[in-house]
Image: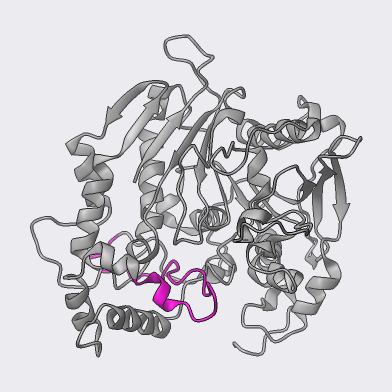
Amino acid sequence: MELQALKSQKVFVEKPSSSCNGFFIHWGGFFTGYSSSDYLGPEYFMDKNVVLVTFNYRLGVLGDTKANQQKIILIDIYYACARFRIFETRRDEILSQSRFLEIARFLEIDFSVPPTMPPPGNYGLKDQVVALRWVQNNIENFGGNRDNVTIFGQSAGGASVSYHMLSPESRNLFHQGISQSGTSLALWAKPYSSELQFSLAQTQAQFVGCPDISNTFAIVDCLRNVSADDLINTGDKFKFFSVDPLNVYTPSVERRTVNNLRPFITKQPIDYIRNKEFYNVPWILGVVDSEGLIRAERILKLYSDRSFTYSIYQTALFHSIQGQENLWFYYFNYSGQYSYGNAFAATDNNINYDWGVSHCDDLLYLFKTPAIFPEFKKTNDKLMIEVMTELWTNFAKYGHPTPENSFLSISANWKKLDNYIHGNLKKEIKYLSISGSHDSRSPPRLSMEYGFYEDRFKFWEQLPLAENIKELNQTNHLTP
């Protein structure tokens, strides 16, 4: 795990103070991604008097599988901790041995006793908790405020934010959250059943040549003797249609045991929400127009809804009726000079096609991405950077994205969800529409709208889908 704490280099006092901290969790479907400044450059935030924390966490077979192997985890943590750096302008601080041992203890690693039970999983999410605890213990040394931490993330990062709303391990470590294009109810982010988990472990064991895959103990004993490189290199063997399934390993439901006293989650996300066991803090959720461009063109709306928008709508609505008080929803439909749609096309050919507003495009106005895109030159793109960073940092500072003292409050007062009034459920969501184009003579537009994707969502609600939620009056004949 590598962590960076960044603050504006324009501040010259010895210990500058900031009213808030931003804690960004990167994208990548829980199998890829990184927080390198080539992809998540902090420059746009550096004029906003915030401390920005970015970091890496374990992914794929090393991050989420319950059949992970302890020896590999030890190697990974040691290597990661050797690289755990806290960057403050030009000063580097290497993680001390005591901090390394503290992290190891948090991850339930005992250096003296060989493991006798399969490891519990969720190591990537537990890495995130470790980083959050580091913020609480250290961020004031960098001019930050431990009492005002906003976690935000996109795609798998957005789903991670949603998971932290549920996990007891994350409680009181942050104070606001923003989920961009992902929540824990997304099909690609939900924990598998125990039967599917075991089948996945068996398949993984077959791919690396394990002779006995009849039980968990045999599988774990075998995997403990497989190198991390060999495990990771089997990832493509799971794919049976082009690059699908994109992500194989998802967060897992753990059991609290003597060997696992601090599980991250012990039941399905929907059950935490159903039982009102969530962290009731301000939360922004939203989507971009064409989420499905990450994988699809001809079936764009289908892929967008099934992978992203419908589950985010469900998350916002269900949390709202279950008592989460401060929720905001947005719809990002600003078409800039650059788009991730070209990157997701996976071709160098010149394709004459308007990709629309793609998955990840909202990140372009929060973080510089020099590894893929050049500097913005269009006036409206530069204005959109101001709009997005103002909304996000307002929320971090004041707990509201458009407070009265913001220049954005003149054009739009972003209103909270109010879908459960006097015991009556309203499915039409209030949302902030963020729209415009880089080649328009008009500046980007912010407007409050009502009724997000009503017809599309009614279609999904009437189908007997396993993920439909009875409390939202959605058809569900596959589960009791």
Magenta segment boundaries in residue numbering = 234-261
**Percent x, y for residue 411?**
87, 34
| Residue at image point 57% right, 40% down | 369
State the image quarter where residue 324 is shown: bottom right
| Residue at image point 81% right, 72% down | 456
Question: Can I make out residue 120 in this image?
Answer: no
| Residue at image point 59% right, 36% down | 368
Furthest-right residue in view?
441
| Magenta highlight: main SS | loop
Is residue 80 part of the magenta span, yes or no?
no
**Percent x, y for residue 24?**
51, 43
Furthest-front residue in view?
349
Is residue 239 part of the magenta span, yes or no?
yes
| Residue at image point 33% right, 71% down | 66
314 relative position to 268: left or right: right
280 relative position to 103: left or right: right
Q: Is residue 50 above or below residue 196?
A: above
232 relative position to 252: left or right: left
**Percent x, y for residue 251?**
44, 66
Furthest-left residue in view?
112
**Percent x, y for residue 33?**
47, 53
Question: Can I make out residue 13 in this image?
Answer: yes
